[in-house]
Image (cartoon, rainbow, N blue to C red):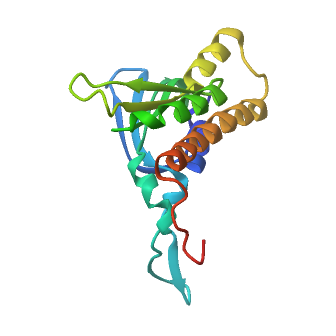
Amino acid sequence: MEYEQLVSLLKRYIYVMYHERYAGISSEYGIEKWGGKHPLLKPELIVVNDQLQGFKRPHSHLKSLEQFPVFIEFEYRIEGDTKWVEAIDIQSEIEEVPIELMPDIKRVAKLYARTVTIDRVSSLTNRRKPSVLIASRLSEEIEEWLDTDGPLGSQEVEAEVKRFLRQFVDVLHTIKLILFGKEEASADA
């Protein structure tokens, strides 16, 4: 998949906070690492008379999404002026999940199994509160497209990538609801 096309899609579904780029001097490959948040946490501007006044506070019912950082890492190949993405990892980790909520998270894992993997990571020191690692299966799909010449048109590729990203974000939000319930919404939510 072309780098610019993927970047524009990622920025629609993940609020990117920072990114780092690694490339060798003579290398035709590059690696980028991004850190981001759920798109609902993107700050909204306050504009009065065409002048920026500041940022709106996030809704109180979204604050718990802060605990779900999103990490993205992708590798690309450079051919002339074009970059081609060869692999991408999109994941989030939730630490210290109460063990009694694992059956609910397992149901979410089964529901989204085609596009997202959810793994339980158990600490050797604290088995009562394991972590949960949520990862998109987009990289597996991209590898398959590279092996089989995948979907032919860029619109088909874009639709598939959107589906994977949308479902990843949906899983984050669903697990937030499992862990924190529906928090009190503000009047303007």
Q: Which residue is outermost to the left?
A: 125
Instruction: Give percent across and percent down for residue 62.
Output: 49, 60
Up-down relation of residue 46 to residue 114 (above or below)? below
Taking the image as shown, residue 17 lies to the left or right of residue 128, namely right
Instruction: Give percent across and percent down for residue 80.
Output: 53, 26
Instruction: Give percent across and percent down for residue 50.
Output: 55, 85
Residue at 58% of width from left, 47% of height from top?
13
Which image quadrant: the N terminus? top right
Up-down relation of residue 178 to residue 152 (above or below)? below
Taking the image as shown, residue 186 lies to the left or right of residue 127, namely right
Instruction: Give percent across and percent down for residue 122.
Output: 33, 24
Residue in front for this viewpoint, 161 or 106:
106
Taking the image as shown, residue 173 lies to the left or right of residue 124, namely right
Residue at 52% of width from left, 42% of height from top?
175
Q: Quadrant of residue 149?
A: top right
Q: Quadrant of residue 9?
A: top right
Q: Which residue is outermost to the top?
A: 147
Q: Which residue is outermost to the bottom?
A: 49
Number of labels in the image equals 0
Which image quadrant: the C terminus? bottom right
Residue at 31% of width from left, 25% of height from top?
25
Residue 81 appears in the figure: no
Up-down relation of residue 138 to residue 101 (above or below)? above
Residue 143 appears in the figure: yes
Residue in front for this viewpoint, 72 or 70:
70
Residue in front for this viewpoint, 157 or 133:
133
Residue at 50% of width from left, 50% of height from top?
38
Taking the image as shown, residue 95 lies to the left or right of residue 185, namely left
Up-down relation of residue 87 to residue 181 (above or below)? above
